[in-house]
Image (spheres, helix red, strand yellow):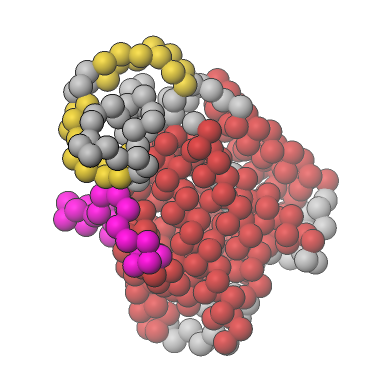
Amino acid sequence: MASGILLAAISAVAFGVATPVVAWAGRGLGPFTTAAALYLSAGAAALVMRMAAGTRGAGLRRRDGLRVFVVACLGGALAPSLLAWGLQRVGATVGALLLNLEAVFTVLLARAIFREPIGRRVALAVLAMVAGGAALTIDVSRTATWSLFGVLAVAAATLAWAFDNTLTRPLSERDPLEVIAAKGAIGGALTLAIAGIRAEPLPSTTAVLALGACGAIGYGASLRFYLLAQRRIGAGRTGSMFALAPFIGAAIAVATGGRVPGGWLVVSAGLFALGVYLHLTERHGHRHGHEPIVHDHLHRHDDEHHSHIHDPSFIGEHAHAHRHEAHEHEHEHGTDAHHDHH
């Protein structure tokens, strides 16, 4: 749980820092050009890291192809295009805070699709974040230059990323760099093709460098940590922890001359902060049983689930097909490959 929470927090920081930079670098550019720059650089960075580090974990299988294509269309093409379009109409501060809705949608979708448990604290956190989104909408609507369509575009981007997060959960046991490289290549190619068809303006060198850095760090490295966190604590809890990202982005936007917080904006931030706190302090532990299973994923032998023996012995993380015998025990855990009960 602790390592999963830390990885999700690192992922959130990387993505949060990128959001105001995307709003700045994307000015004057088409949304598909912006999305293409972000995900092509994310995929390229993942490919370079994989070549340098070697294979880590189980690689993608042919049966994963359709799932990778769907999450690439949702999270690598649709979501960043909507975000880029919406940020130009609501600004970096409001846009960053609206990204909190991704956690709400992810928790609900993880419950609906994978039946991940939602306790009272998580339910209260979701309600607080929904109220925070409503307060933020009220705040935006009081300004002379507010854009309902901009708000809806960013909200739609968070919904697309929530579907991406949830559908990616079965891929969390694969090599994360391989998943990112495939997602970046497909999403980047799709948005680049659409940008060409729409004849969107070409970005300047400065914009290319800025968006490339954001893609490599905020979308490439961030997604790698996100997948590693999902592997440990499940889709819902990882999505909840990722709600730290919008606060980081909003703080940077305000510090660099963005919109000064008003009354409703402060209320919204407070409600989102309450939601994040409730998620962070939520605990799940009880006596549970494990059925026999054979699977292949990255694992280590200093946990309570991998006691098989290697000859010669192996220390650290490694991947291979292995069998788990049936057993029963009690400990704190998230919803991962070994704890899919509800």
Indicate left or right for 161 with 67 as reference. Answer: right
Q: Residue at x 73, y 61 (%)?
A: 253
Asked if the stretch drawn in magenta spans residue 194, the answer is no
Asked if the stretch drawn in magenta spans residue 67, the answer is yes
Image spot of residue 5 (x, y percent):
53, 38
Q: Residue at x 50, y 67 (%)?
A: 215
> Along the line of sight, which residue is nearer the eye, 5 or 309?
309
Q: Residue at x 35, y 79 (%)?
A: 193
Q: Is residue 297 visible?
A: yes
> Along the line of sight, which residue is nearer the eye, 33 or 131?
33
Indicate left or right for 252 with 101 as reference. Answer: right
Q: Is residue 239 above or below residue 337?
A: below
Indicate left or right for 336 with 16 as reference. Answer: left
Name the residue at the front extreme: 312
> Along the line of sight, which residue is nearer the eye, 251 or 158?
251
- In the picture, which quadrant includes the C terminus? top left
How many labels, in total?
Answer: 0
Q: Residue at x 33, y 57 (%)?
A: 179
> Along the line of sight, which residue is nearer the eye, 336 or 300?
300
**Magenta residues (range):** 49-69
Image spot of residue 289 (x, y percent):
30, 15
Q: Main secondary structure of the magenta part?
A: helix
Image spot of residue 120 (x, y percent):
55, 20
Image spot of residue 32 (x, y percent):
46, 74
Q: Is residue 95 above or below residue 233?
A: below
Q: Is residue 77 visible?
A: no
